[in-house]
Image (cartoon, helix red, strand yellow):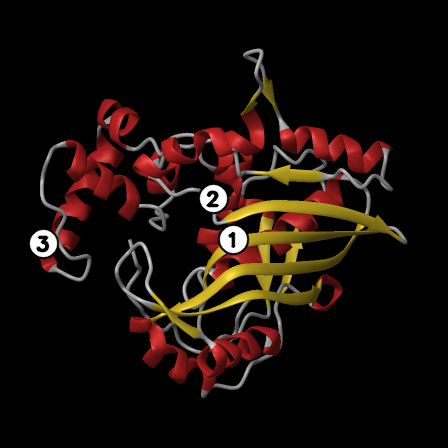
Amino acid sequence: MKQYHNLLNHIMENGATKTDRTGTGTKSVFGYQMRFDLQKGLPLVTTKKIPVRLIITELLWFLAGDTNIKYLVDADNHIWDEWPYKAYLKKLGLPVPSTSSEEWKTGKDEFIAKIKSDAEFAKEHGELGPVYGYQWRSWPTPNGGHVDQIAQVIEQIKKSPDSRRMIVSAWNVAEIEEMAKSGLPPCHCLFQFYVADGKLSCQLYQRSCDTFLGVPFNIASYALLTMMVAQVCGLEAGEFVWVGGDTHLYNNHFEQVTEQLSREPRALPTMRINPDVKDIFSFKPEDFTLEGYDPHPAIKAPIAV
C-alpha cells in the first residue's frame, strides 16, 4: 500500500488549508488517483490495523439495500453510529456535545443499546434515509418505480461486457438534503465497471475523502466488491482504480499520520471468497476469509461529525 502512503505524504506537503462542515479544519488537495492490481492481493492498509469484518458487514448492508443501522449494530459494527445519534439529539431539541466528550460517548452508547434492544426505537431513530443501499438497489424513477442498479449492472457485465454504461450512482440530486438529515450525502458517489481480457476492473469516484480514517475502508470495500462481482460474473478480478475529489486530512489527524508514515508497509493479504456463491445478493460474512494479514497496531483518531 505504498500508493496510500504516497497520498498521505502528498497531502501533508501540498495540501491547502481549508475550513469544512464539521468545523475541524483540513489540509486538502483536489483530484488524485490510485491504482491497485487485485491479482496482487486485497489492498488493505498494513501500516495500521484495519478491522476487515466491519468492511464486509457494511458492504453486505449496502448490497441488501438496507438503510437502517440496526443490521450493523446487531453485527457489532459501529462505523455509522455518530450520524443518527446526532440527528436524534437534534430531533429532540437537545444540545449536541463535543464528540470527544464523555457526555457524547455515554449518550451515544445508550442510544445504540436502545437501537439494539428496541425494534420500534430502531425503526424510528436508526433510519438514515435514502443513503447508499437505497440508491444502489431502489433508485426512484419519475413514474413511481425503482431501479435496482446492482442487479442491472450485473446483467450488463454478463450480457454486454463492452458497454460503457456499467455505472452505479449514489448521487441522487433530488434526495441529497434528505440523506443529510440523519446520515451523510454519499462520499463514494459513483463507480464504473470495465471488462477486458476476461478481467473485471472498477473505478470509483469519491467526492469527499477523509484520507486517514475513511479512505482505507473505501479502498478495501470497493476492491472486495470488484472481486465479488467478478466471481458472480465468471471473470477474474482486474484493477481497482480510486479517484478522489476533495481529498483531505483533518487537522486533528496530523499526529496520527506522522506515526503511520514512520511505519514500513508489509505484504498485502489475500481474501478467499466462497467459490460456491454465484449470486451477488447471497453472500454472508462467513463467505470471506482473510489470509496473511500482518498489520502494524491500530492508530486511533477522532471522527469528524
Q: In the rendered structure, are the residues bearing label 2 and label 1 in contact, judged by CB atoms less than 8 Å apart?
A: yes
Position in image of residue 76 (x %, y %): 34, 47
Amino acid bearing label 1: Arg
The quadrant the N terminus occupies is bottom right
In three-dimensional space, the C-alpha distance between marks 2 and 1, rounded to whole angstroms, equals 8 Å
Q: In the rendered structure, are the residues bearing label 3 and label 2 in contact, judged by CB atoms less than 8 Å apart?
A: no
In three-dimensional space, the C-alpha distance between marks 3 and 2, rounded to whole angstroms, equals 28 Å
The residue under the point 44% across, 52% down is: 54
The residue under the point 81% across, 42% down is: 234
Q: Work out whether mark 3 precedes mark 2 in sequence or the reverse, and give the earlier one.
A: 3
Position in image of residue 139 (x %, y %): 56, 26
Kindly give the residue lying farthest to the top in the view shown: 143
Q: In this figure, which residue is indicated by the disc labeled 2?
A: 186
Binning the other alpha carbons within 10 Å of mark 3 as few (below 14), some (14 to 19) or many (20 upward) gives: few
Q: In this figure, which residue is indicated by the disc labeled 1?
A: 207
Q: Front-most of 104 and 273?
A: 104
